[in-house]
Image (cartoon, coloured by chain):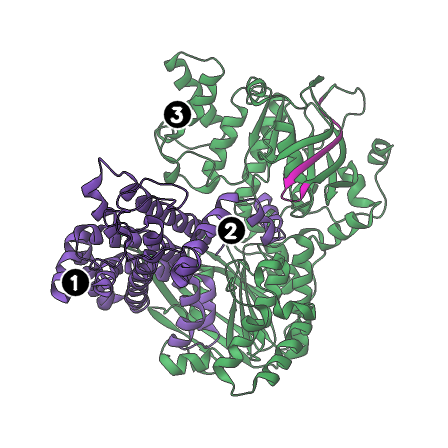
Chain colours: A green, B purple
Amino acid sequence: MSTIAFPLRHEPDPVLNLEGLSVAYRMPDGWRRVVHDVSFTVRSGEVVTLVGESGSGKTTTAQAVIGLLPSNGRVDAGSIRLNGTDITGWAGRRLDAIRGKVMSLVPQDPGSSLNPVRTIGAQVGEILELHGLRDRRERQARVIDLLTRVGLSEPAMRANQYPHELSGGMKQRVLIAIAVALRPKLIIADEPTSALDVTVQRRILDLLDELRAETGTAVLLVTHDLGVAADRADRILVLKDGRVQEQGPTRVLLERQESAYARRLLADAPSLLPPKQRSVLPTAEVLVRVEGLHKSFRVAGRPSVAVEDMSFSITAGTTHALVGESGSGKTTTARCLAGFEYGESGRITVDGVRVFGLRGEALRLFRRNVQLVYQNPFTSLDPLQSIGHIVGEPLLNFERIGKVERLERVHAMLERVGLPADSIARTARSLSGGQRQRVAIARALILKPRVLVLDEAVSALDVTVQAQILRLLDELQQQLGLTYLFVTHDLSVVRQIAHTVTVMQAGRAIESGPVAEVFTHPQADYTRDLIAAIPGRGLVPRTHPSPTYARAAE
Amino acid sequence: MTTFDLFNARDTTPRLRLVQLQPTLILAWAIMALAIAWAIAPSLFTPHSGTVGIAGNQLKAPDALHWLGTDEIGRDVLARIIYGSINSLSGALVAVSVGLAGGTALGLIAGSLGGRVDAFVMRMVDVLLSVPGLLLQLSIIIILGFGTVNVAAAVGATTIAGFARLMRAEVVRVRRTDYVEAAFGSGGRFWAVLGRHILPNALGTVIAYAALQFGSAILAISTLGFLGYGTPPPTPEWGLLISEGRKYLTTAWWLTTFPGLAVILVVLAANRISQSLQRTP
């Protein structure tokens, strides 16, 4: 671990010091406190991570530090000291002088954080201009320097490009260039890689690490991924419901957790768990067969290949995972299997039925056996319908049964997926993300299909909820003998759920085989890259803490 | 992460509280309720007659007996406004119903069937939109003949295009959502999915637009009444009242001002209500 530079000899002055910080939001029924009594320090050159699930107050804490709370938020109590100066409650004007110069922000979503109508160069140059660099030519040179520094290829050309011409990872590099432009003492990175692929994520985090080592900048990293925290942080703060559950040096915290919540969070992080051993019964029949699948789309008038010569098969009752980065064609393959897209050549058979020939009523009947669960549970449920309607709808389509019987089956299904009985009359709006995904699974399973296609079905969920859903899917598979096609970009999840895996890159299958084999003996370079990029690797907690870190903990 | 929080926070807010915080919305509903009450039971609100004048009482300025004054043949202006509301409101209601029904049907067909049907329907709508509204209304009235219902139908016909465009856009948007695909995926037939998911979800915005159109329809009907194509005198109608008062603009300001104010207030109220419908679908 090159990133750990824990101060043992001397204690540098803290760059950031939070003392009993409390933040409240104004709601229609009064002020509601969302961050309670948070205290921590960040020293020069140190990486401190705030870890927690959505709603834990980690982003709010970071926003309070840089003075970017939403207009209905305020710091209720406590103090924020930056370099020894109390900046609590400073007005925006006053903060402007230090934002960018003393502390800066790397925002969460690179896609929406750059102005689409201005060039990259102009946007990086803006911060230099705001803080006093008037000379245009000098500014231009500095911009190109910075773009080079954050690892953009052909920086002179990039400076004249617009955000839409850059990929997500490149945009994040530009934002980092803006953040480090004036060599601030503190960089606040709010989920800087959550919207990026794993391999890009690793490169971005490596870049932040390098810049930190080079200039001694302190980093406050906000993340929901304990694996990222384990890899990158000197110290970790675990937040839940706006309270610090636990804080300590990374090693110590990973080895021994004081709070029950930190233990649970650690137990649920797929990247920190040992792989589950699953074997495929050799006698079982092959249920799904994909052979030579080829599919292209027209993008801006030109054909663009999405899937090329894709083949794999799934044994009944097992889980096959499709892994790859965004744009690798994994979702297209899944949608072809579910009958929502048609391949141009090749064929897919489910239980001997060829999918591509199906039209009209035959396709409708086919769907009884193959169901798709979507990535985003917030868009896959009709906002106007009650949960009972949503889950009962497939029955309306296929089975001529009375209302009473239908309700009974919906009730049984909701119980099966672990939803409270009173949710039947509620709308999706009142449910959490995890509960919504349970509804989507209930809707998919009520017809007792044989194949379930899960398109990034757990990617949008917090680790704890993710772990619950994965357990549920596992149980259902064992009880009902379901066959899963599991599409994901997260290799650590694959290790937890799948029997076999196909790794995809640019529309092609790179590698295929049983999960254990692919993980232990990857053949393709790309697979090795992907495995190496899983955050938190090699940090499986040991039983005995090393003496150095035990001392540090005291 | 933060957006997720806000989502939940907004969700737990009770509806009633939102209404309490919006006095202008309450005022808008009060104005609308009063106008509807006038239309249903005008005699409860005024002792005077809306059509029969009293001799020797001509062109009286507003006073304690005639709050809004009297007109050139001694009829109480307030009574004329109150009795006239039925004509203006029912006309607007008919107009909006015609537009809503016709436009929604066209938009739904175009948006859900797509392809050539879509192209054909939308080009027809474009043609309809390219003709100035007033010209179209006048042509329709000349074909159908004068009268309250005909004016309303003409006003309604010109709004079909707007409704159709909006409805089509909404249908296209809803059709692309995951939940509609999921409904097809769970074995839904075309018409079932259309009725269960696409229509209800698309209708939210269109209903808000209908409330907005209600205001414009009152205005359009008043315009046609003012031009003399609407309800024949002596039946009171707000546009007609303004038109009749025009001759006495210099001597009796109340003849035009108060009916005009009634039109403005009801139109504003309809707009405000439409806005609130848009916000809470």
Start-end of magenta stretch: A15-30
Q: Is residue B111 magenta?
A: no
- Nearer to the camera, B18 or A179: B18
Residue shown at 60%/62% (left/top)? A436
Quarter residue A123 falls in? top left
Residue bearing the label numbered 3 = A122
Q: Amino acid at mark 2?
A: Tyr
A98 or B93: nearer the viewer:
B93
Query: What SS does tag 1 mark?
Result: loop
* Residue A526, label in figure: 2
**Which residue bears the numbered disc 1?**
B146
Q: How many angstroms separate mark 3 from mark 1 (CA)?
A: 64 Å
Q: Residue at x 45, y 13 (%)?
A: A133
Residue kind at label 3, given as amino acid type:
Ala
From this viewpoint, is residue B174 visible? no
Q: Chain of mark 2?
A: A
Residue B268: % across, % down = 38, 46
Across and down, in percent, residue A325 comes to 49, 52
